Structures are given as structure tokens and as C-alpha cells.
Image (cartoon, helix red, strand yellow):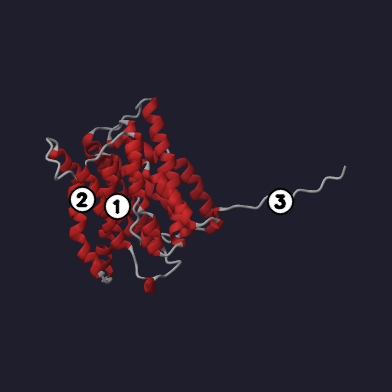
Amino acid sequence: MITRPRPPLPHISAASLDPRLLVLAGAAATSLTGSFIKLSGVSPATSTFFRCALALPILGYLALREFRRHGGVSRRVPAAQVFGGMMLGADFALWAHSITMIGAGISTVVVNVQVMVVPLLAWIFFRATVPVRFVVTVPFLFAGVALAGGVLDGSGDGHRLLLGTLLSLAAGVAYGVYIFVIGRAGSPHRASSQVFVSTIAAGVVGTAIGSLWGTVDFIPGWSSLGWLATLSLSSQLVGWVLIGFALPRLASEVGATLLLAQPVMAMGFSMLLVHERPSVGQFAGCAVVIVSVWVVTRSRPAHRRPGTAAATVPVAVQND
């Protein structure tokens, strides 16, 4: 019996996949972050330490491969990555504590105020033009943040909701600085090494800031450790690398619009996994925030620049 040789299986690489699908996959992974942190039940310092530490071995391996393939970089690049990582660590710690106060879903939506930070920094340092829609949208964005923070609920937890919302806002500012800095030093060919360096800095600074609400528990228990390991692998590793790899291959407005799926999915996951039930006013505030973010990040067709390095895009990831 003569057997015919089977045709070789097609080779599938990340570069051959639709970058839009990669961004959505990364957004899905990062949208689970808030729920996983809440399920772990640990302090902000503990969650920040483990989400960074557990991802480092694999990130280090991927970064070493990039170094062997593309060589070294100028000294300014690691310096920018370290500073950006410090801001990212502040974001991690502040946001993790806000989750315990206002919930995983709402905090993920509120933290997207970072889309306002990036254009402001570009205007301050590079005199970039600030679109009129940006100025017009700012009041609506903060009104949405106030609603999401429960300003209309009138419950006894008003002070707790206010503090949690302010922490999310501060986390969004820190994250905006991170995006702005990394946007000047990022490269689609060095996504892993950038995340590796930033993760080290974020782990050190974030753990220190998170210690304001409790020291690191190095033995949090198997259940908590399992959730933290899942968080580290899904969000800190898979989500960040996918988004960092795919965004530079998309027009800036396309990447920013796709990433709006992240806060929407975060709300859904928080309701499904940790049984959060936001009020009608909070839902309305989240909707206003998401629409405001979309208005700010959208671009006119005439200004599209496919292939532009999208690290300057306000990335709606939290972290996140």
C-alpha cells in the first residue's frame, strides 16, 4: 500500500495573526485582574509583589531571546522603562486597594482616566495640539467618575466610595505617566524585555507603596497563591505581552477603540466571578466614562497613520 505524504501543517506565528484579535485577547486577559485580586483576598502589597515576581522567570526568558535576536539598546531605553515601571508599581498598589473599596469592575472603569493624562503630558512636554473634543469631554468624564463612585447612592459608605474612587483616579494618573514614558521608548520587537524591566521596577515600588495598607504576606495560603499565580500568568504575562506586541501594528484609533472592551469585560467578569452588583447610578457613570474615553481616543479618518507606534495610545489596561 502506497501512502501519500501528508502536506506540512501551516506554520502559525503571532506575527501572522490579526493584531485586532491579539489586542482583544490581551484585553480579555487583563480585564480579569480586578476579579482575581479580589478573589485572592490579600493586601495590595502582597498582590503587587506576587503578580510581578511570578511573571519574572518567563518574562526574563522571553527578554533574553529578544536580546539575542535584536541586540542591546541605548542606556536611555532601560532608564525610561525603569521610571515607567515605578509609575506602574504605584498604579498597581493604589488600584489594588481601590478594588477593596469600590469593587473590581467599577475601579477598572474609573482608572481609565489615564486617557486624559497622556494628551496633557504630550502638550506639556512637546506642545502637542490638544483636540477640542478632549477639552469638551473632560467634564463629562469626571461626572461619570463621580457617578461610578456612588455619588448619587446616598449610602453610609459614601466616604469609603469617595476614597476608593480617588485612589482609582490616582492610579489612572500613574498609569498615564507609564504609558507616556513607555510610548517614547517602546518597540514592537522588544515587548517582552520592556515588560520585564518595567515589572521589576513595578514590583519594588508597588510593594513599598502597598505596604501602607499592610506588609507582604509571603505565605498567603494555597488558594490565594493560586489566584495570584493565575493573575500573574494571565494579565501580567499574556495580556501585557499580547497588547504590547499588537498595538504597534494597528492605527492608533483602532487600538484605542478595541481596548475599550477591557473595562466592559471587567464589569462583566466582576459580576460573574465576585458577584458585584453596581447600582443603576454606578452603571450610568461607567457608561459615561466609557463613552468619554471613546470620544477622546477616536481619530478622524484623515489623520490615520497605520503602523504608527501605538505605545502613545492611551491603553485601557489595568493594569492593570
For image coordinates 52% across by 58% down, the residue present is 71
Q: Mark 1 points at which residue?
A: 175
For image coordinates 36% across by 29% down, the residue present is 224
Neighbour tally class for label 2: few under 14, some 14-19, many 20 plus, Cα within 10 Å: many
Q: Mark 2 points at which residue?
A: 145
Element type at mark 1: helix
Element type at mark 2: helix
Element type at mark 3: loop
Q: How far apart are marks 3 and 2 (CA)?
A: 54 Å
Type of the residue with mark 1: Tyr
Would you say residue 276 is visible in this rendering?
yes
Q: How far apart are marks 1 and 3 (CA)?
A: 45 Å
Horizontal side of 83 relative to 29 (left or right) equals left
| Residue 8, numbered circle | 3
Residue 248: quarter of image: bottom left
91 over 189 or under it: above or below: above
